[in-house]
Amino acid sequence: AQSVTQPDIHITVSEGASLELRCNYSYGATPYLFWYVQSPGQGLQLLLKYFSGDTLVQGIKGFEAEFKRSQSSFNLRKPSVHWSDAAEYFCAVGPNNDYKLSFGAGTTVTVRA
Amino acid sequence: DVKVTQSSRYLVKRTGEKVFLECVQDMDHENMFWYRQDPGLGLRLIYFSYDVKMKEKGDIPEGYSVSREKKERFSLILESASTNQTSMYLCASSWTRNSNQPQHFGDGTRLSIL
């Protein structure tokens, strides 16, 4: 069975600074990997996904993530955060032959002016 | 654009009541999901449906049941609500069974059981 760890429960970053959110997964083969964002009072929105190929994937809202097989990681980055990026971020992993996603516990991002 | 609509944003019920949470998607998706979201635990899958009248248990099905009589609608039922079912409930849908199809989420129902 797959699992996901997001080591950081809460991150505070200044507006305009860079952001990196960590995600480590456990799975026997190459999984499907996702990052979702949840703004206050809303559901989850897909930021980006990785299935295969180029290990650096671009997403919406200026986010990117890098898959590192050797480290079992899929970290999310943004070069310059905006106040609207304050939200909760979830990493998810899914097997390549079934529907079931496993979600991390989430990282809450606070953006200070 | 995919739209997943959950009928209530906030709901307050009493212990022992039968509670229905409704979810409708407008993209003819095969799959629909119910998750429960709790702080520090992320999202946990309650039930999954891959077709009308078809369902599979997720990780935490105890105390819940589901109904899918039409393709676009997936209902979560709390047969006899208890205080430990106070939570945020999220519905999602996707095209196919394979996890490479992203799941699209509704805005959630925050349920309080008193």
Image: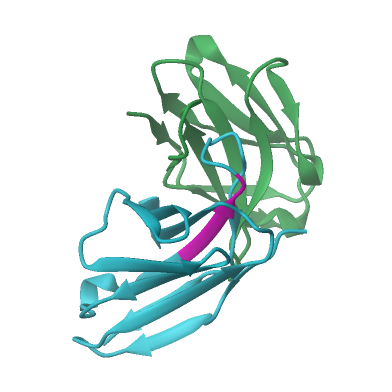
Image quadrant for the C terminus of chain A? bottom right
Image quadrant for the N terminus of chain A? top left
Along the line of sight, the residue nearer the viewer: A13 or A105: A105
Residue B101 coordinates in the image, percent (x, y): 61, 39
Horizontal relation, residue A67 to residue B62: left or right? right
Residue B113 coordinates in the image, percent (x, y): 29, 83
Residue B2 coordinates in the image, percent (x, y): 71, 59
- Residue at 65% x, 58% y: name it: B28
- Residue at 51% x, 32% y: name it: A23
| B40 up-or-down from B69: above or below | above
| A36 up-or-down from A5: above or below | below
| B57 up-or-down from B111: above or below | above
Residue A27 coordinates in the image, percent (x, y): 40, 22
Q: Which residues are magenta?
A: B90-95
**For the image shown, how many numbered marks are present on the structure?**
0
Horizontal relation, residue B3 to residue A72: left or right? right
Q: Quadrant of residue A66?
A: top right
- Residue at 50% x, 38% y: name it: A92
Q: How is the image coloured?
A: by chain
Of all residues, the one furthest to the top in this rendering is A70
Along the line of sight, the residue nearer the viewer: B5 or A61: B5
The secondary structure that most of the magenta stretch takes on is strand
Q: Is residue B17 magenta?
A: no
Chain B image colour: cyan
Q: Which chain did the image draw in green?
A: A
Q: Quadrant of residue B5?
A: bottom right
Horizontal relation, residue B69 to residue A67: left or right? left
Along the line of sight, the residue nearer the viewer: B68 or B42: B68
- Residue at 27% x, 54% y: name it: B60
Visible residue check, residue B8:
yes
Q: Is residue B94 magenta?
A: yes
